[in-house]
Image: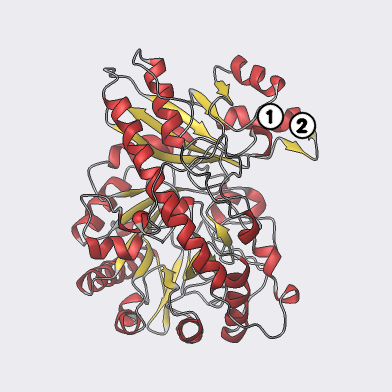
Amino acid sequence: MSAPMISLQGLSGTTVFDQSPARAKSGGCASSSCGSSAKPHEMDSAVWEKIKDHPCFSEEAHHYFARMHVAVAPACNIQCNYCNRKYDCANESRPGVVSERLTPDQALRKVIGVANEVPQLSVLGIAGPGDACYDWKNTKATFQRVAKEIADIKLCISTNGLALPDRVAELAEMNVDHVTITINMVDPRIGAKIYPWIFYDNRRYTGVEAATILHERQMSGLEMLTARGILTKINSVMIPGVNDEHLIEVNKWVKERGAFLHNVMPLISDPAHGTHYGLSGQRGPKAMELKALQDRLEGGAKLMRHCRQCRADAVGLLGEDRGQEFTLDRLPDKVTYDASKRETYRAVVARERGDRLAAKSAALGMVKTAGSGKSLLVAVATKGGGRINEHFGHAKEFQVYEASPKGISFVGHRKVEQYCLGGRAEDKSLDGVISTLEGVDIVLCARIGNCPEDRLKEGGIRATEAYGYDYIETAIGALYAAEFGSEPLAATA
């Protein structure tokens, strides 16, 4: 009999893996390092070492590892029609938004405080709220301070690319080996519809001239990073009617220049945010429109589909934000780094990753031998750890997977308003959840009440708690086999 999986509840304060031995079982992997060595067979070992614990650059890692952003770079050198940087709105989850700006010294204090309490932490990023390469003095000082105290933390920046070519050499010297560049166009005529102005070389440019300069600098920066072996993720905002079709060309350009990942994100266009697009009525894409574009891009630059469009002060696993737990007024005046929790967490995760890899392999085999040419779209309620361990009514998002003869793949997530709060359920919220799950065939969750299950069924969506606490891929493999006539897997991992 396999040993029960070790719970990390006591370490993190956030349930990552369920504690129930009856449900959450180890697959028998005894090595504490098997997960770390279990790299994808097609990936270079050096690249795998860079991404295996990075939740943004590895879809698999995002089930286990957390990122934090420190808001030390408020200055920006371009204006985007989808951006309005606010510093005082804790309830908005979107790029450019922060509750408090930090000095490099304050950032160090916060990073140590988070690292001591969030053992999942593996990456420190600077994503503004302006531009990390433009506000370089603060960015560089923060990285230097943190690297001296926490040597194993990965350093990562996000930039619009305008000032990037001037910073590549220093990024390499500081061992920053992950850079995200937001590239929304390669045709300046389209860029002029997205960027009202840029500030470059001590003057302001507008229109096509501004977009041309930005485009040239972005391509130059990307090529320089590739030449130095620094991994790049390209963020592109999908703006219906503006650049949605054009992003196919963007994908080709960035692939040719060595981008590691291409992340196509939906425009966030709520008028309440005060952005130009929000106020002018420009809509964002529907979930199925985004998926359709991402599907068309398959075969080009490798796609990232697990992005959550994080705040510039986000803390925690992707899909959660614990930033308000670590505001400056909640931190001690003096903090000392204690590596013990992070070290223990990584040892547990290494075993869990190895077990999940074995379970995933078995599930993929079942799907591929099912003999069906059909696909199944499955929404999963999860707290992390690659397991179905969230109550339907408590979910704030659903991770969406597609099972087909090609295998089981993560295709995106759907953010929802939590349906059940304090034991009370809101019909209006449930209506929103059902609408957001458009196109999904089946919902998997740890628990679900009769009422929401019946309402989902009325909307053409099935839901089941039969696979609660199983590995996600194990459950989907069993579902697919049962759905299309093959002998199903057991219900537990």
The residue under the point 42% across, 53% down is: 351
The residue under the point 42% across, 81% down is: 203
Look at label 1 and name its amino acid: Leu
In the shown orientation, is residue 249 left or right of residue 84?
left
Q: Nearer the viewer, residue 379 or 438?
A: 379
Q: Nearer the viewer, residue 377 or 135?
A: 377
Most extreme residue toward the top is 485
Residue, disc 1:
430
Q: Are marks 2 and 1 in contact (CB under 8 Å)?
A: yes
Q: Position of residue 474 (x, y in %)?
A: 42, 32
Does residue 228 sit above or below 363 in this rendering?
below
The residue under the point 80% across, 40% down is: 422
Say which element carries label 2.
loop
Look at label 2 and name its amino acid: Glu
Does residue 139 sit above or below 61 in this rendering?
below
Residue 148 visible in the snapshot: yes
In the shown orientation, is residue 5 left or right of residue 324?
left
Residue, disc 2:
426
Residue 285's disc is none
